[in-house]
Image (tube, grey):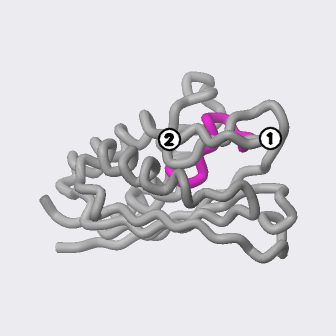
Amino acid sequence: MFRIGHGYDVHKLVEGRKLILGGVDIPHTVGLLGHSDADVLAHAIMDAMLGALALGDIGHLFPDTDDSFKGADSLKLMEKVVEVCRHKGYCIGNVDATVIAQAPKLAPHIISMRENIARVCKCDISQISVKATTEEHLGFTGEKLGISAHAVALMQKI
């Protein structure tokens, strides 16, 4: 049996924060603002996994009103999401994700992102697709005000 879910996340770019995407610390002049490390890629993937199993979203599991998640490593949160999914009898079939950012160039970091996510999800890297695109200077991502990510996760019965 298969289940599919979609996830979306967005965070504002600000000075004084690291830019973490897919667990990779990417050198940049600004970073993403959020309660945790604001890893939009990891957040979108987690929401897709949870959505596939009708388990809500990461805000339900890791509320921003809980100080224990302040500054949290999103890959550590993803480990917990993977455990929840396995407890429900599902694992990753595959993930397809897209990060939307005008800058910086993400291509050099894609393999590391995929490796990190595959490791945490306990699957092969071939099951994790990460792509990056710009919005040709349009909208908030194009104007470098924020970064967003979309993800689709196919969950399969263990």
| Quarter where residue 69 is shown | top right
* Residue on which disc 2 sits: 23
Q: Residue at x 36, y 48 (%)?
A: 115
Q: Residue at x 83, y 42 (%)?
A: 14
Q: Secondary structure at mark 1?
A: loop
| Quarter where residue 19 is shown | top right
Which amino acid, by three-letter code, is at mark 2? Gly
Judge by depth and name the residue closer to the eye, 67 or 119.
119
User: How far across and how far down the image is residue 55, in percent?
Assistant: 40, 56
Neighbours of disc 1 within 10 Å: few (<14), some (14-19), many (20+): some
| Residue 9 is a magenta residue | no
Up-down: is 113 above or below 51? Answer: above
* Residue on which disc 1 sits: 29
Q: Which segment did they paint magenta?
A: 32-42
Inter-mark Cα distance, 2 to 1: 18 Å
Q: Which of the two marks, 2 or 1, is nearer to us in this view?
A: 1
Looking at the rendered structure, the number of numbered marks drawn on it comes to 2
